[in-house]
Structure formats: C-alpha cells, structure tokens
Amino acid sequence: MDTTQPPHTALPGDASLPFDATLLFKALQYQLLVAVEYCYDLAPDECLWLEVMGDVTVPGKAQTEVKLYSNSLTDSHPNFWNTVKNWLHENFDRTSFKSLVLLTTQEFGAQALLKGWNTATPAARLSIMETIAGSSYAGVDQQTKQESEDVEGGAKSSKARKLQQHVMAPERRNALMEVLERMHITTGAESLEQRLQSYQTRHLKPIRPSKCQQFIEDLLGFMSSPQLVIGGWKITHQAFTDKLSELTHQYMKHPKTFPKVDLAALKKAIDVEEIRPMPFAQKIVEIGGEHHLKRAALHRVVAQNTISDLYTDGVLFKPMLDGYLGNHLTLHQYGRELAMLGCMGITCPTELSTRSMVFFIERNGLPVEPFCGLEHTMPEFRNGIYHMLAGEKPEDEDDEFHWRLW
C-alpha cells in the first residue's frame, strides 16, 4: 500500500505540514476496499491476509500490492521495481501463488516499455527489464537526466539504479523468473472515490439508500478492527460472510429488525427549555412529570427520526404509520378510561396527579407492539409515538391524547 496522491483540500493558511498523515489513511481505506472485493471471491475454505505477506494476500492464489498514486507508471518508477524487489525476498514463497499482481491507479507512461507487460512472455518481460536497467546505467533515460540536474534528483537517480541493480543481479535471476512467470500489472485502477461508488452500485442494491454510507463504514471498520489486527489480520470466508449478513439484515430495504438508533448522540441534542412549551411536554408537566421531560423529548426524537428515515428509504408508507398511530391511540384511550374509573370520587389534586404519574409510568413500561412487523422494536420508539400523539390537536377533542386522569 502506498500513495503520493496530493490532498484536494487546502490546509488553513495554505500551509503544507510535513507530518500530515491524511494520505496514509486514505491509502489504507483504498487497500481495505481492494481487500473487500477479494473477500467476495473467497471460497468457503479460503481466507485473506492483510499486510502479513504484502498488501492483500489470498494464500495459494494471489498476492497483490496496492498503489494509490496520481503520477504515471514510468519504466523506472519505484512502484514497479520495489514491488518486484519485495517478491524476490528470500522468505517470500512466490511459487505458492498463481498470480502476483501490482494494482495501481497509475497509467503507464507515454513512452513506457512496460506497456506491453501483460501480453509478454516471461523471457520478453526479462528483456524489457534489462533494456530499462541498461538505459538507466547508460544515462539515456530522460527522467534520470532531468533528475540528475540537482542534488536531490541525483540522489533519486542513484537510488533507482541501486534498486534496479539489486533486482537484476545474476544471483537472483532464478527467483526473478519465478516472479515474471506470475506477475500481472493492473493500471488505471479506480480512485478511492470511484471504487466507493462502484462498490455501492455493485453490492448495495438491497440496502436502504440512506444507510449505504453507514454500511460501508461498518464494513471497513470490521476489516480493520483491532480484534482482526491483533489476531494477525486474517479474514476468513466465514467471518466476512457473517459480517455481510449482519449488515444486510440491519440495513436492508425491507428490514426485519428495527433500525439501530444512537441514543447517546440524540440525547446530547435535547434542550429541555426548547421543548417545554410544546403541547406534549405541557401534558407531562401538568401531572407533575417535570423530571421526565428530557427522556420524553429523547423518545419523541427517536420516533420522528426513525419514521423519517424509513419514509426516505421507501420502507414505510403513510397507511402503515397511520395504522400504528391509530392502534396506540385507541389502546391508550381505553387504558386511560379504565384508570379514570379507579379515580372516581377523588377530588384531591395531589392524589390525582400521583395516580396520573403512575398511569404515565405504567403506559411507558408496557410490552412493545412491533412497528410494521420489525423485530426488537424499541420501547423508546413506542413511547415516542405516545408523545407524538400527545402533540397533536385532533378535530374531535374527545380524541385528544392526555396523561391526566381528570
């Protein structure tokens, strides 16, 4: 994994900082996306390794080096020569792989001899490398000439020559031929942004549109989870399949399970003073439930946000919502009428408020009827439905939602 792609956003004051590691994280996300695509092709008995034997490795099949670069892949580019050098390492078991792949977002340089690599025989590939290395030694490589005009360029040129000498050394010729028999160069690979879009187009059709980004973030989080990294960064077919099943079940267009809600994040945005004048809040205050306002506001937001998301994704339709609201209003009215019968003859305001609070707490603690058949419908959502109903002003005042028992 590597990158020299420049950042697209300017830093404050247009200052370039030498310790900005943004591109490293971008390159890691790119590598993880490449690994995800490989995971889709794993057979039941196969696994994938990250970084252990190179960027992305499927034992017995392919080892892939991933490069996120914006410049051209020229004949002397270190991405090519360093990759070959890595595969020549004495501890790298290159013969165990059917293919060795250099995957890069770069395009071949206009004059690059490497352009014909993938159709060339191993012997022809060796000849190409010998020609490139020979030109470099002779000083006829145009890029080397330009680089040699300054000290830094000369150092780069010298480093490139040493790298080529290492790869082309006679004592490594047998190992080099083993690499050349298996090596494939994939140029012009999609950028990070393009790869993300392609993944969504190919794999996320069953997922609710508003949850596609969350699906990708959760999947990449799994791919780089501490548990996997500590365990050697090995991803099995079973583990990947299980995670896909979990995320699909959670974010599918017609879900079976109630959507996940970040209660902690929603709670931070609740302002009791802002909601206090609202009808639903006033109906709680009038029975002495001041200390329940923040929780009630949170539950109301849970219900509103969930309904909005399901509407947006085409999972929920108005008749379904109206039916759920109507059922709860009817059940609440019968429950309230029963509780009011128990209050007959009571005139003490304090006693009526106390009984009303008991009724409020009992209703909020009732078992939850699944919303649109969704398993594990949250009680916070159902209670939020109560507070939504309490905020409405119906045409018939007898249908108005109240907590008070008078």
Image: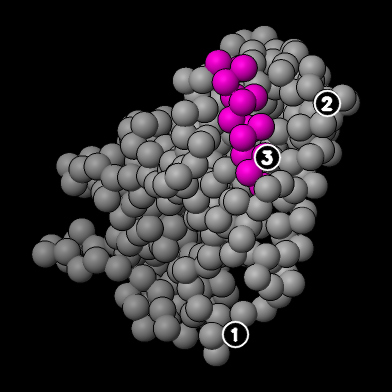
Instruction: Give the residue number, with chain letter if any, for mark 3.
Output: 133
- Residue 105 visible: no
* CA–CA distance in space, label 2 to label 3: 13 Å
Task: Kindly identify the amino acid type of the residue bearing the numbered disc 2.
Answer: Pro
Foreground of the two, 144 or 366:
144
Q: Is residue 347 left or right of residue 391?
A: right
Count all numbered tags in the image, as a single digit: 3
Q: Please rate how many residues cluster around mark 1, counting C-alpha atoms within 10 Å: few if below 14, some from 14 to 19, many from 20.
A: few
Above or below — where is 107 with respect to 296? above
- What residue is at 79 percent from the left and 28 percent from the top? 88
Residue numbers of the magenta segment: 121-136
Q: Secondary structure at mark 1?
A: loop
- What residue is at 61 percent from the left and 26 percent from the top? 127
Q: What predominant SS class does the magenta segment belong to? A: helix
Q: Reading the chain from its start, which is encountered first: label 2 or label 1?
A: 1
Give the percent coordinates (x, y) of residue 375: 46, 32
Task: Kindly identify the amino acid type of the residue bearing the numbered disc 1.
Answer: Ala
- Residue 80 has which mark? none
Q: Reading the chain from its start, which is encountered first: label 3 or label 1?
A: 1
Q: Secondary structure at mark 2?
A: helix
Within the magenta stretch, is there residue 133?
yes
- What residue is at 74 percent from the left and 13 percent from the top? 96
Give the percent coordinates (x, y) of residue 48: 68, 25
Instruction: Give the residue number, with chain letter if any, for mark 1.
Output: 15
Foreground of the two, 214 or 250:
214
- Residue 170 has which mark? 2
